[in-house]
C-alpha cells in the first residue's frame, strides 16, 4: 500500500469513527493529522537515505571510470616492452567496464526511485496542508456556530424575562452604590441655597 493510500485509509477511518460515535471531531482530526505527519516523516527519512545511496553510487561510478582510464593508459605504456602485461591491463579494464555497466543500470533504477519518492512526498505535504486548512476552516465555523447559538438562546427569552434580568442587575448595582456612598440622592433645594450663598460671599 502506498504512503498516500495509508494516509487516506487512516484519516478516513478515524473520521468515520468520529462521525458514527459522536466523538470530539477536532481531537480525532488532530490525531489523524499527527499520524499522517508520522508517515510522511518516515517517508522523508527513507527518501533522504535513497538520495545518499544514489550519491554514493555516482561517486563510485566516477572512481571506476578513472580506474578504467588508468588501466587503458598502463596497457598503452607497457605494450611495447611487455605485451603480456599489457593484455592483463586490458583484462582489468574489461572488469571495470562490466562493473561500470552494472552500476549504471542500478543507478538508473535508483534515480527512478528518487523521482517517485520525491513526487509522493510532495503529494503527502499537499494533502496534509489541505487537511490542516480544512480543519482550521471547520474550527472557525464551529466557533461562529457556538456564538450564534448563544445569541439565539438570548433572543429566545421573552422580553419580560430580559427586562427582569436587567432590573435585578440594576438593583444590585444601586445597592452596591449606596453601600459605597455613591448612591445618595441629591437635595436640589440644598444645592440651590448653597450656590446662592456662595455667590453672595463672592459679591461681598
Image (cartoon, grey):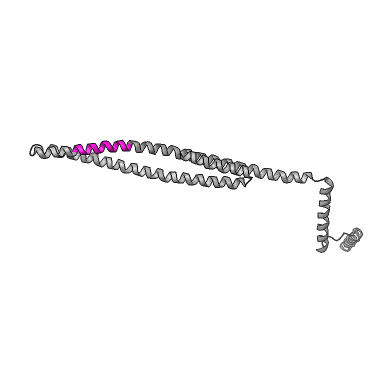
Q: Is residue 97 magenta?
A: yes
Can you give x and y, in whole percent of width and height, for residue 7 in the image? Answer: 50, 41
Near-viewer residue (9 or 81): 9
Q: Closer to the camera, 177 or 89?
A: 89
Q: Position of residue 122 (x, y in %)?
A: 46, 39
Residue 58, percent across and down? Answer: 30, 40
Q: Is residue 135 visible?
A: no
* Residue 117 or residue 167, whichever sits in front: 117
List the single residue furthest toward the left: 81
Residue 54: in magenta span: no
Q: Residue 11 location, x and y as percent?
A: 54, 42
The image quadrant that residue 184 belongs to is bottom right
Q: How many discs mark residues in the rendered view?
A: 0
Answer left or right for 86 relative to 148.
left
For residue 172, side relative to residue 149 (left or right)? right
For the point 83% across and 54% down, the residue is 168
Asked whether residue 5 is in view, the answer is: yes
Q: Residue at x 55, y 40 (%)?
A: 12
Relative to 190, is 67 on the left or the right? left
Image quarter where the C terminus lies is bottom right
Main secondary structure found in the magenta portion: helix
The magenta region covers 93-107
Residue beneath the point at 63% across and 45% down: 21
Amino acid at each position: 500500500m502506498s504512503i498516500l493510500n495509508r494516509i487516506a485509509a487512516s484519516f478516513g477511518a478515524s473520521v468515520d469513527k468520529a462521525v458514527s460515535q459522536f466523538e470530539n471531531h477536532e481531537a480525532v482530526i488532530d490525531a489523524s493529522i499527527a499520524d499522517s505527519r508520522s508517515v510522511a516523516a518516515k517517508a522523508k527519512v527513507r527518501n533522504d537515505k535513497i538520495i545518499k545511496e544514489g550519491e554514493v553510487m555516482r561517486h563510485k561510478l566516477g572512481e571506476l571510470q578513472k580506474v578504467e582510464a588508468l588501466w587503458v593508459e598502463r596497457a598503452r605504456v607497457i605494450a611495447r616492452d611487455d605485451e603480456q602485461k599489457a593484455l592483463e591491463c586490458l583484462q582489468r579494464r574489461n572488469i571495470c567496464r562490466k562493473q561500470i555497466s552494472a552500476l549504471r543500470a542500478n543507478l538508473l533504477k535508483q534515480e527512478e526511485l528518487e523521482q517517485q519518492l520525491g513526487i509522493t512526498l510532495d503529494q503527502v505535504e499537499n494533502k496534509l496542508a489541505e487537511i490542516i486548512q480544512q480543519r482550521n476552516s471547520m474550527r472557525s465555523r464551529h466557533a461562529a456556530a457556538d456564538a450564534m447559538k448563544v445569541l439565539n438562546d438570548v433572543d429566545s427569552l421573552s422580553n419580560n424575562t430580559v427586562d427582569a434580568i436587567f432590573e435585578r442587575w440594576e438593583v444590585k448595582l444601586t445597592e452596591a452604590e449606596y453601600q459605597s456612598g455613591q448612591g445618595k440622592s441629591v437635595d436640589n433645594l440644598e444645592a440651590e441655597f448653597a450656590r446662592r450663598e456662595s455667590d453672595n460671599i463672592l459679591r461681598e
